[in-house]
Image: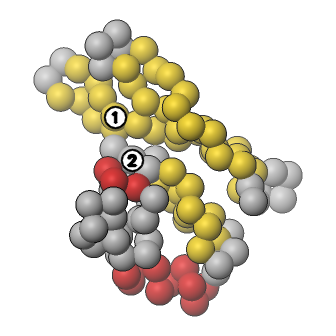
Amino acid sequence: MNMISGGSSSGGHAGSMGIRAYILEQNPNLVVSGHIHEAMGVEKLKDSYVINPGNLGRFYDRDYGTFMEVELDGNGKFSSAVLYRIDEQHGRIKAVEKFKRW
């Protein structure tokens, strides 16, 4: 995953250098962004957890893509997340990856 460090799995730029600079300067607990197809998941930058649920949409009569369920602890801090993908062939939703605080 490389949504905020200026690169992608394809080697090109896939994230915002402005958002990366903001995260490094302000150090928020949680940042949620989306649509970067190459970088679905959770990444930690400094003390900030950056969550990219990917791309979720509808094309003609079919749903497709990914989304995340995020859990916060009692102090509002990131605890865990689950990345889900819509199974286009069967129209079902399945968990594909789990993330825990580290």
Camera-side residue of 1 and 88? 1
Q: Is residue 14 visible?
A: no
- The answer to whether marks 1 and 2 mark residues whose Cβ atoms lie closer than 8 Å is yes
Q: Using the rendered view, name the quadrant where residue 97 is placed.
A: top right
In the picture of the structure, the residue carrying the numbered disc 1 is 65
Residue 102 horizontal/vertical position (percent): 75, 59
Above/below status of 48 relative to 42: below
Q: Is residue 61 visible?
A: yes
Q: Amino acid at mark 1?
A: Gly
Residue 81 horizontal/vertical position (percent): 63, 44
Q: Which mark is residue 49?
A: none
**Earlier along the polypeptide chain: callout 1 or callout 2?**
2
Q: Using the rendered view, name the quadrant where residue 6 is placed.
A: bottom left
Element under label 2?
Answer: loop
In the picture of the structure, the residue carrying the numbered disc 2 is 54
| Residue occupying the point 44% across, 50% down | 40
Residue 12 horizontal/vertical position (percent): 24, 69
In the rendered image, the residue lying farthest to the left is: 60
Q: Residues within 10 Å of mark 2 (few under 14, many from 20)?
A: many
Q: Is residue 12 left or right of residue 1?
A: left
Q: Is residue 90 left or right of residue 62?
A: right
